[in-house]
Image: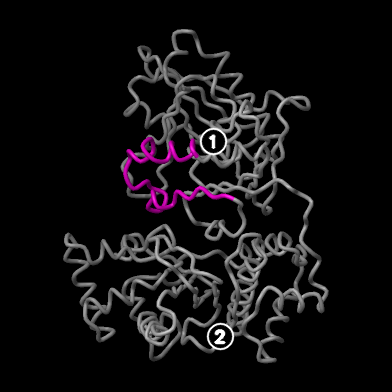
Amino acid sequence: MKAVSALQQGNTYQERAFWLKVCRLFRPHTKVAQVGYEISDVPHFDDIAVIYSEPICDARGESISADYYQLKWHVDQARSLTCDALMDPSFIGSKTTSILQRLHEADKATSDKSQSARFNFVTTWGIPHDDALAKLVSGRDGELRLDVLFGQNSSRRYSSLIQRWSDHLGVDREELRKTLKRLRLCANSVSLDRLTRMLSDDLANVGLRPIENGSRSNPYDSLIERLLSEGRQVFTAQEIKSICEQEGLWVGADSGHNAPLVGIRSFLQFAKHMEDDVEVLLDLVDLFDGREISAPEYWNDKVGPMIREFAAESVIPLKRCQLYLSAHSSIAFAAGYELDPKSGIRVSLVQNTASGRSVWEIHPGSGTQRSNLWKVSEIEVNSEGGDVGIVLSVTHDARSEVLEYVRDHVPHLGRALVFTIKPDIGSTSVTDGGHAWDLAQEVVKVVRERRPWRESTGALHVFSAAPNGLMFFVGRLARSLGPIQLYEHAFESDWPDKYRKSLTLTTI
């Protein structure tokens, strides 16, 4: 019974992942021409296919004509995706062919007609941090870092791995590199529940009937099963619309908001296809390796100027927009800084929350500002220091980590103002856009009131554990606070310190 249940949940995962790709057909700026399910023309990576009307660019800047997917959902976390697992048929429930062998067969089968296809292996199992694969899989879009694997300075560990993988496939070094170039690994993929919530949001956004909360049945699951039994595997937007109209699942896209959607991303998680949605996009992913910036100087030499130029040339002229951020907190703050209220643009934020995606609509200067939203404490760090730090504890308590860091690394910091959200810290502690705007106003007000004259010429150091929406609003109000030094939390476990400097902002 357990095996049957696991198999059914695996099928459900594939079906809902398919419909998530279908939603891309209806995005306003999509290049997706067709979406396929259980396709027959590509071996192994046949669970889902996404065919583009014209090539798109991957993270390396190379043209991609199609994406093919093999999905492996698991009921537990009993195993991990490793270098050895890629050579182990049992890892994917096969008796004969491994992931690498399937990749090689798919590569050969499509080499004549589709040189630029990608092959995506998606699994809910993760990659252990101590396996070589953890250093090889890029945080951009899951491609293997071939410059690391095959580089001149490649370690003996990687040389041995190249030999093992080459022997496994019966190919030479160059053939292996060519094959691996087309592989994308998406480990630790979202849960079935999270996938379903994402799907329901996307269905509603493109004009399809969303999945009802708490519903035990899903009409989209049974629909793709029926279509497959009819021999229908590949679909265009018009075909999906016609089918869903017949099934009572098409409700029409909402044209109620006319504000153009603009986007900024510095990592791809949950924003891999942002370009399908937005009018204009600032894509900073190439400057980062996962969450860590490729070189520390890029923050001020590249990221800052790019945000400034994007705001001035692409966003402010719109006069009104919705801003979708999938980016580091420093970038969210800097975007607000460049789009301050005096810029004349009215900005709404597209915010991902625990209950789904929502739009935070703010009208500066309207309504009554709520107060006493923070518990504020002052901590002396260095009696000789002329700088001030602020710590925003919203999603989790950042106080101890920040104080440990600044005492060792920020010698000019005199005092820290620690803001702890009321009533409780947590992932849902900011309720909506109005709440976020009031929180931001109170932060800036308190900083002004509690910052003596002698400290007002020093830098303001900003540390946060807070939603990007709140950081954006604080940034919008921060131009009067003098020079600002932002910091990023060290999510990567191998960072020696908990924080690193990011952007420096100064009013010109």
Report which residue position mark 2 lands on.
Answer: 39
**Above-or-below relation of 359 to 393:** below
Residue 501 picture quarter: top left
Residue 292 in percent (x, y) is at 38, 47
First to last magenta residue range: 280-309
Image coordinates for residue 235, horizontal then vertical, percent: 65, 79
Query: Which is in the foreground here, disc 2 or disc 1?
Result: 1
Q: What residue sits 33% from the left and 45% below the top?
A: 495
Colour setup of the view: one colour
Residue 39, picture quadrant? bottom right
Compared to residue 460, the image places residue 2 above or below, namely: below
Q: Quadrant of the N terminus?
A: bottom right
Q: Residue at x 66, y 44 (%)?
A: 322
Report whether 11 appears left or right of 462.
right
Q: Residue at x 44, y 18 (%)?
A: 415
* Left or right placement of residue 119 versus residue 472 in this view: left
Within 10 Å of disc 2 (Cα), the crowding (few <14, some 14-19, many 20+) is some
Q: CA distance from mark 2 to mark 1?
A: 45 Å
Left or right, 487 with respect to 146, comes to right
User: Residue type at mark 1?
Assistant: Ala
> What residue is shown with label 1?
312
Q: Secondary structure under badge 1? A: helix
